[in-house]
Every structure is written in structure tokens, then in C-alpha cells.
Amino acid sequence: MLCALLLTQLGSLIAPAYACGCGAMVPSRQATMGVDRETSVVRWDGATEEIVMRFTVNGDAREAAWIMPVPGRADVELGDPGLFGELDELTAPVVRTRYYFWPRDGDWPFALGDDTSAGAPPPADGGPPVGVVGRERLGDFDVARLTATDPGALRDWLDTNGFDLPADLASGLQPYVDQEWEYVAVRLAPEEKGAVLGGTLDPLRLTFDSDRLIYPMRLSGLADQPQSLGLYVLADHRMEPRDAIGGDAPEIRFAGRVSPADAPALGKLTDGEPVFLTAIDQYFPEPERIDADHELRATAEDTPYQQATYDDALRTFGGVPAWLATVGAVFVVLILLVVGRAVFRVRRRAG
């Protein structure tokens, strides 16, 4: 019992490292943080890629570090929170009514009343292993744009600047170092003194040059809990991931060409031009199986798709249930046939 209690207390002092789909989010010491949901908007025109990310987090951390590898020199700024609401409306399932003929539970006569249920260039030889390209404060975010030729040196730099990272993060960064990528390191520290990180955070917008549409995911393999990813992809054509990279099969939730005429935030991101929007959801029950970044490609055809939800309703004619009107009409016809046959017999006998 004593050993169990000691182990429990020891575990409470260790800050678990939670990874999100785009990088690694790590809370400060003696704090916990979980990423409930990560939603990102990816815009790609064949040469430039923009990623707008929004996180919903929980826990008691007052500060946290977030690291994302990028294939080129990135510009970072705050994103428009209204963008996600507009995309949610554009991709919402269409509601259709599905009629049925015979009454069901809750319909008369079974029930009375209504049923109301319802790639950057490497530094010159002899240069520092970690270079600071820029650093700025954006709302609750302290953003540092970095280059690195040594993942261990990058970890040390972040540790020196107040970020406590897990030891295995260096090994996770090694493939990006080999490809000469750069990094965006973010300290999430609310300006309000004593505030904790919780709920939906302000979105961040990253812009960098890229000749392919890629969404960094490899660092999510460090996560110790299942990951949920939502992607809104804006491009010239319908897009799809090349493979599942260790997660469940990606699910296309929406595909179609959209106009930003009635969506101001979307219009700013696309310069007012119509684009093809693909909404993709994916679940990673075993994050340690993630072995690559998401690379998206155009599908053979721009086939539109939209989910539909159905409201079942009893078919009526003039407010009268169709089945009742039909049965009543048949009953009236039968009565008329019986009466007519009786009248015919009477007249025949009289004749």
C-alpha cells in the first residue's frame, strides 16, 4: 500500500508529453495538458502552403511548449477565429426529409399526442547548431522561428528558454534535421496572470513555400493517448492523403467547390477566389504507429460529396395521414360496391 501511494505521488510530479497532429505540445513541469481536438485549415496553390491551426485543450498548465517542423522559412501570425465557423457551416450535412407510409411508434393510433424526442537552406559550416530566425509575441503566444542541424542542440535551446521536453523528442526530430527543415516553437503563455490554458485557443497561421502539400504528423507518434485530426484542405482540386500513415482510414466528410462570397474569413485566405474544399477526419487509436507526415494529392476526379442527415416524417395529404386517407378511401369504395350490388339486386327482382 505504501509503495502504491509513493508511486502515485511520484506520477503526479511528472508532466506527460502530449503530441498533437501537427507537432508536439508539452506543458511545463508539474502540470498536465491534453489536446482534445486539433483542427487545421490547409491552403495550397502549388507553390505556397498556409496552415491555420486551432487547438482545444484541457488541464491545469499555465504555460506549454508547442513545436512544429516546416519544410521552409515560415511566417507566423494570428489566424482569424471566424474561419472555422464558416467552414463548419459550409461542410455541415444537408438535412433531408424521408417520408414513410405506415404509422410507427409515436404515431396515431399507437400513441396519443406528439412525440417530442428528438526545405530551408542549411547554415554555413561552422555556424551555430541552432539559429534564431525571428521571435515575436502574438497574443498569448511567444513564437520563435528556428533552424537546427542537431536535434539535441535544439532540445537544449528550448530547455534553456524555459521549455521542458521529453528525451525522446530529439529522436523524433532527427528525420526533419536530415531533411534540413526549420521549426516553429511556440510558448503558450496567457497574458492574464495566473490563467491556465484551457478551452479553444486562438488560431495560429503559418505560411511557407512548398512544392507539395504536406501536413507534419510524425511527432504525433510520441503521444500517449489516441489522436483525433480534422483537416480542411483548400486547393484547386479535391485532395486525399496518400496513405493512412498508421491511423484509421481517412474519412472524407465533404468535397465540393466553394465560393468565399458569403464567407469573409475564407475570402481573405483565398484572395476571394473560389476553391475546392475537402474536409478530412482521421483517428489514430495507436499514435506510436504514425511513421510519416501526411502528404496529400489530387484525386482522379473532382467528385463532390456531402453528408446527409434524414428527418423521418409520416406522409400526409392535407394534414391527414396518407395511410388513413388510403384505407378510408378503400373502405368507402367497398361500401359503395356493396350498396351498389344490393341496389342492383333489388331492381332486378322488382323487374
Image: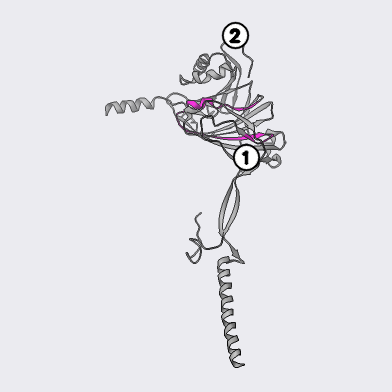
Local secondary structure at mark 1: helix
Which residue lies most toward the bottom here?
A: 350
Front in this rendered view, residue 32 or 279: 279
The segment highlighted magenta reads 212-239
Front in this rendered view, residue 121 or 260: 121
Q: Is residue 110 above or below residue 37?
A: below
Going by the numbered disc 2, the residue's amino acid type is Gly
Query: How far, Cα to Cα, is label 1 from label 2?
Result: 44 Å
On the question of residue 162 being in view, the answer is: no
Specify whether residue 237 is painted magenta: yes
Where does residue 100 sit, x and y in percent of width and height? 56, 59
Front in this rendered view, residue 78 or 223: 223
Going by the numbered disc 1, the residue's amino acid type is Leu
Where does residue 342 sit, x and y in percent of width and height? 57, 85
Q: Which mark is residue 231?
A: none
Which residue lies most toward the left here?
A: 1
**Residue at label 2?**
127
On the question of residue 326 being in view, the answer is: yes
Where does residue 346 sit, x and y in percent of width and height? 58, 89
Callouts 1 and 2 close, C-beta under 8 Å? no
Q: Is residue 261 above or below residue 315?
A: above
**Residue at label 1?**
87
Packing grade of label 2 (10 A; few <14, some 14-19, many >=20) is few
Specify whether residue 1 is painted magenta: no
| Quadrant of the image occupied by residue 333 | bottom right
Local secondary structure at mark 2: loop
Q: Is residue 304 above or below residue 295?
A: below
Where does residue 82 sit, x and y in percent of width and height? 62, 38
